[in-house]
Amino acid sequence: MSSIPNSQYSEEPPTQAVILAGGRGTRLGSLTDNIPKPMVTFHGKPFLEYLIDMLRTQGFTRLVLLLGYRPEPIQEHFGDGSQFGVEIEYSVTHVENETGLRLKLAMHLLDPVFLMLYCDNYWPLPITEMWNQFKYYGAPAMITAYRNEDSFTKDNLVVDSNGYVIVYDKTRTAPDLHGVDIGFAILDRSVVKNLPAGNISFEAETYSKLATKGQLRAFLTYHRYYSVGNLDRFPVTEKFLIQRPTVLLDRDGVLNRKMPQATYVTSWSEWQWLPGATEALELLNKAGYRTIVISNQPGVARGAMNQKDLDEIHQNMLGNAQRAGGRIDDAYYCTHDWDEGCWCRKPNPGMFFQAQREHHLDLSRSIFFGDDERDGQAAKAAGCPWVQVSESNTLLSAIRQLLAQGNLAN
């Protein structure tokens, strides 16, 4: 296993994405009688269009679509890709072809290194971060592994403490599986070139063998993915793809005056809104933004207050904001002390991912406003853009500026 920077790859991430979109989609029943599953629409737009929009924003300029079942609706809608800001090439093969054969038949279209993904999963990939990890470790393949702490789906992986996949089980029956491949992989073209002949599954053939050799890297994520692969997932996918604009806010030092170090706001009588904070909430509410608070509150663990005190403060905070014309949709807080090693306390990103799952957020599009370096560290770990609030850059001034620039669009 390589553990030193690998120089064979360029500094810049790949710009080619290869999308597997040839299956019948039988789990969708009659929905796919006349169209392939990536053309099922959400909010007036095909699922595949959301994927292509996301790839374009991540710097992918050239796409190869590997089609089989009913390719015409896809080709007619997307054409050469120019209307969507990308270049699209197509490889259309028999509907019964497995993923391995489909890739093998498109070998002449593939770049030396490319992103491969499925047409039925959406996940806001951070390509720069993924590429830095891929080129550092030098494994010929790196898949994306959803940690699946919420048992959202059935596991099919074992990932070791060094970030390598040591078991890849497409049947999902091996013991001690934890994590699932969600279908976003950076691949060296050699893994396709080395495929054996025949109508084979790329994943079963390649990933399992690479895992046994210690050559399959995992990019770990706690950000939920969204799928059009089966009907049970449609409700949450529909909520996610509404793409409602959202901002995330720290509490103390952003909304209210922060108490001196090692002391806390222990009752509503001690709460003081910062100048302009409620006006900022009003602006966000009028602009249609969802607003969520994410805050460390160790005063509970340290005995300065109890849970009832904290609940009362937050109830008053929400009520006050609403009466001022604003809105706070939810408030997440960690009551652990700094040395308890919890996943939720910032600079750890646990609260961000809890909010992501419960509100179906796209964290890559949800700006976090905080006032100290731990906020920035937590935002980075969660994949959120971050704006630092200070006396010279209050929440109100930051919100005004970003709304004026249109930078809060989700």
Image: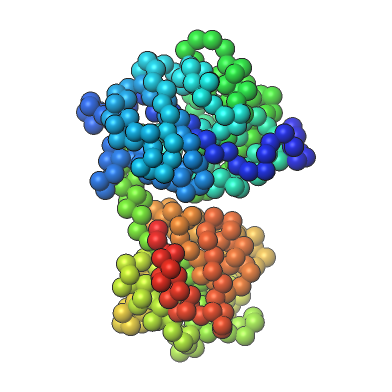
Residue 52 vs 156, above or below: the answer is: below
Q: Position of residue 91 (x, y in %)?
A: 42, 22
Q: In the image, 210: left or right of 102?
A: right
* Quarter of the view holding residue 157: top right
Most foreground residue, 354 or 45? 45
* Quarter of the view holding residue 135: top right
The C terminus - image quarter: bottom left
Kindly identify the residue that appears in the image at 54 percent across and 39 percent down. 15
Residue 355 vs 390, above or below: the answer is: above
Q: Residue furthest bottom?
A: 269
* Quarter of the view holding residue 312: bottom left
Q: Position of residue 150 (x, y in %)?
A: 47, 46
Can residue 166 be seen from the camera position used here? no
Q: Position of residue 208 (x, y in %)?
A: 59, 23
Can residue 20 be seen from the camera position used here? yes
Q: In the image, 129: left or right of 316?
A: right
